[in-house]
Image (cartoon, rainbow, N blue to C red):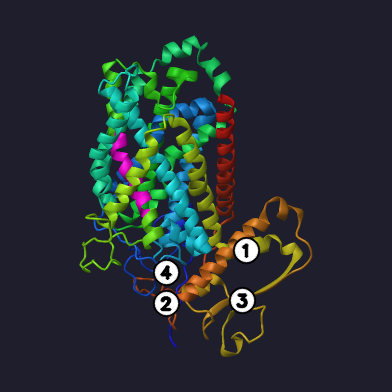
Amino acid sequence: MAATLELPTLSEDRKDQEDDDYLDAITGTGRYLSGNENSIDTENDDQAATCTTSLSKPIMKSGIRGASANMVNSIVGAGIIGIPYALRQSGLVAGLLLLLLVAFLTDKSLRIIVGLASFHPLLRNRHIETFEDLAGACFGKLGSNFILVNMFIMAYGAMLAYLLIIKDTVPSFLGVDDSEKNEKLYKNLIMAATSALIMLPLSIQRDMASLAVTSTFSISADVLLVCFIAGYAPIKETVENAGGFGKVLATDSVNPTLFIGLGILSTAMACQHSAFIVSGSLENKTMKRWSTVTGNSITISVILCAILGVTGYLGFLDETKADVLVNFDHDLPIAKFAKMLLAITMFFTYPMESFVARHVLVMLFHKGDMDGRDDPSHTGEDGYEAGGFLFLNRRQSWTLSIYIATLIPAFFFEDLGPVLSITGAVGGGCISYLAPGVIYLAVNGEAFLSSVSNLLQNKSRTMTNETLVTDSDLPVAGDSTQVMSASENAMGGIGLPIAGSRVMATNQSHEGPKPLWYYIGGFPLWCKIASTGKINITQMVDDNVTGEITNSNPQGNELDNEDTMVPSTSEYCTAIFFILFGVLSLVAGLTSNIWMQVTQN
């Protein structure tokens, strides 16, 4: 039986290599060569499909600019207006350092999760098209549901925050006085009316590419809003009254409520929950193009957040509110104009989060079939939608339900700060940091376990031989010590070596107790994660075997490369840092919020 076994290898010449591949985009240090410098088609490979959902794919596509605009709009939402408050809680210096750290981790995680799903040698042709599919490939239904729940927490918290900002800004812009007798009623009516007329119709759109224009308007409004706060915040007077800038740095560099600020910053920068929706809308998706989108988006967002945060905080210091515009004189015409800009941003950003929340519910209840193809009334025609309530289709029904579910609590909630902080601590901690790190270890499970085995070699007896396989070398029934590399197995798509091919056969026998550093470094947990991921992904690959080796190169080109590149130790350390930082953000963020609420009451 003749078959082509494709194994990626590391390029020796990185300077002239222009192909878009998984490893280079994530680490910047190496490249997998597939014998083809064109983009990898991750949507039209009929030979391998892993996803069990009937995910409705976008009809409209957007270019790099449109995808970048949508991503920036997803990042710079309600969170940006809370950045000055985050600096107040964290401290000026600590807050800025946390902003840079969160931005770096966000960019890194966006490249990791999309890169693993679309361009990793083990997964790139398995039709992993959503964040939950990626987690499910590593940890089954538990992993998938973990991602979906936290995606919904992030989206729902953000949508609630947007409505609260609308309730706080639009009535003031329209002249509603806080001292009026029925002020709360007027605010709620205005919030309901304006959101129903603007937010709801935009949210009902089918594809995120439809929001590229409104996202551009939203970003423009954000830029003008930043300019307003930077230009009109009473920085000079406030800093002088506080004893000068040096005194501010000495007293407000780091605050005990550091993790409340981290939660708000995580909310502001979190966009992992919409990463696959945006990347799915990117025309001709390659890792290079996706990296361009994330790089542009994070850079623009950090600049806007830093300028608004520093100027807004220095303008009001300890008096800074969760919505910094509340600190400005409501009667100033320029302040009303700024509130209008913020309202525009909220109107045009809410649909981004609604898309995510709708995606979660459609995945949970309809296995991704937003078009209602499983409904008896569906005609089977492309573009036709069914499966909703009354005269609405499924997409419209879920969108309306989500809108009502966020509108009702917005009638009663007033304080924006806890909403932003708790959303960031729970959803951001889990989906922005914890999940990408865990998934990275799981997908590269075999390579990680091999690296740990090498670290333990002084306590182990390992014999490794690379040989040319002949008929006499094939595994013998009952020989439990001979194992194949899962990478070779997955790339080839079979469970046994082929005569004439080259394999790595390893016999391992670890004797004696593990050293102390193994336990102090948490390696039992990291190895458990890697082992679980290795088993599940190997099983996933085996389930797609159809009798012959599946050509993992959708372009059909043959490769002579025999060695698979193993990720570096620094990448594993980064993944572990993601996990630890996510746990810290979750636990400390919730604890800080609870403590603050108790002490204030």
What amino acid is found at the position of numbered circle 3 in the picture? Val
Task: Judge depth for marks 4 and 2 and give the one in front.
Answer: 4
Residue 94: % across, % down: 54, 30
- Give the number of the disc on residue 483: 3
N-term mark: 3 or 1: 1
Give 15 or 351, whichever is nearer the viewer.
Answer: 351
CB atoms of marks 4 and 2 within 8 Å: no
N-term mark: 3 or 2: 3
**Quarter where residue 249 is shown:** top right
Task: Judge depth for marks 3 and 4 and give the one in front.
Answer: 4
CB atoms of marks 3 and 4 within 8 Å: no
Could you tell whether 419 is left or right of 164 in the image?
right
Q: Main secondary structure of the magenta part?
A: helix
| Magenta-colored stretch includes residue 353 | yes
Q: CA distance from mark 4 to mark 2?
A: 13 Å
N-term mark: 3 or 4: 4
Q: Secondary structure at mark 3?
A: loop
Residue 213: % across, % down: 23, 43
The residue that mark 1 highlights is: 449
Q: CA distance from mark 3 to mark 4?
A: 24 Å
**Quarter where residue 183 is shown:** top left
**Residue positioned 76% across, 57% down in the render:** 515
What amino acid is found at the position of numbered circle 1 in the picture? Leu
- Give the number of the disc on residue 50: 4
The magenta stretch is 345-359
- Give the number of the disc on residue 550: 2
**Residue positioned 29% across, 35% down in the render:** 192
What amino acid is found at the position of numbered circle 4 in the picture? Thr
Q: CA distance from mark 1 to mark 2?
A: 26 Å
N-term mark: 4 or 2: 4
